[in-house]
Amino acid sequence: MGPTTFNGMPIHPLLVHFVVVLVPLSALLLLLSVCWPAARRRLGVITPTVAFVSLVLVPLTTQAGEWLEHRTPRDPLVETHAELGDQLVYWSAGLFLVSFAWWAIHQSRVRAWWAKRAGSAPTQVSRVLAIGFAVVGIVLAVGSVVQVYRVGDSGAAAVWNNPEDASATQDR
């Protein structure tokens, strides 16, 4: 299990901020790379690198959240948040895999290797693969941002819809 506290405070809220920035950033970089060849060339390995960092941080954040969940009273809002958070790793993994594949298939060494093995129809096969990766990349980019929103919204509801906090605020 990864780190759970930092200076005595739960680390989950800190890690969440990295995930909330890096997963949508990964999605944006992938969209730019897929839809704009000049951006793909300029971004290069940055796109899969940011997606990889996101992929590493999502499970760490989830584990820290589960640690925190087991130390708080049972709450259906927290359970919903945890279930949605558990799904984010799949979206993040997809972003990384497609980002890496998209970067790799546009490398000259990979193109040369593919041309040797593809035989008589390398451009047609390459075009079909590129279109397939582009479509999957766009779906993953949009889906991952939607999932980050869903996880964040449920987390905010779990934190701010606590009846004890509401009654304390009304007493002021």
Image (cartoon, rainbow, N blue to C red):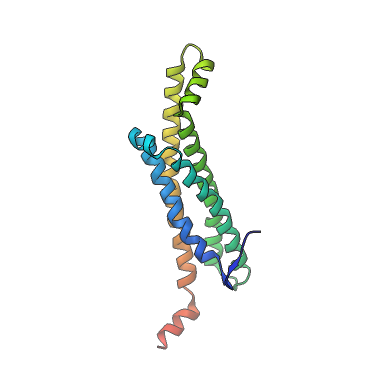
Q: Which of the 4 image quadrants contains residue 30?
A: top left
> Can you say whether 155 is above or below 137 in the image?
below
**Residue plotted at (56% across, 60% down):** 82
Percent of width and height locating residue 25: 41, 49
**Residue plotted at (47% across, 79% down):** 165
In the rendered structure, the answer to whether residue 1 lies left or right of residue 17 reads right
In the rendered structure, the answer to whether residue 82 lies left or right of residue 150 reads right
> Can you say whether 131 is above or below 141 in the image?
above
Percent of width and height locating residue 81: 52, 61
- Of 154 and 46, nearer the camera is 46
> Can you say whether 143 is above or below 163 in the image?
above
> Can you say whether 43 is above or below 154 in the image?
above
Percent of width and height locating residue 58: 54, 54
- Of 163 and 107, nearer the camera is 107
Q: Residue furthest top?
A: 120
Percent of width and height locating residue 157: 46, 67
Q: Which of the 4 image quadrants contains residue 137?
A: top left
Which image quarter holds the N terminus? bottom right
Q: Which of the 4 image quadrants contains residue 67?
A: bottom right
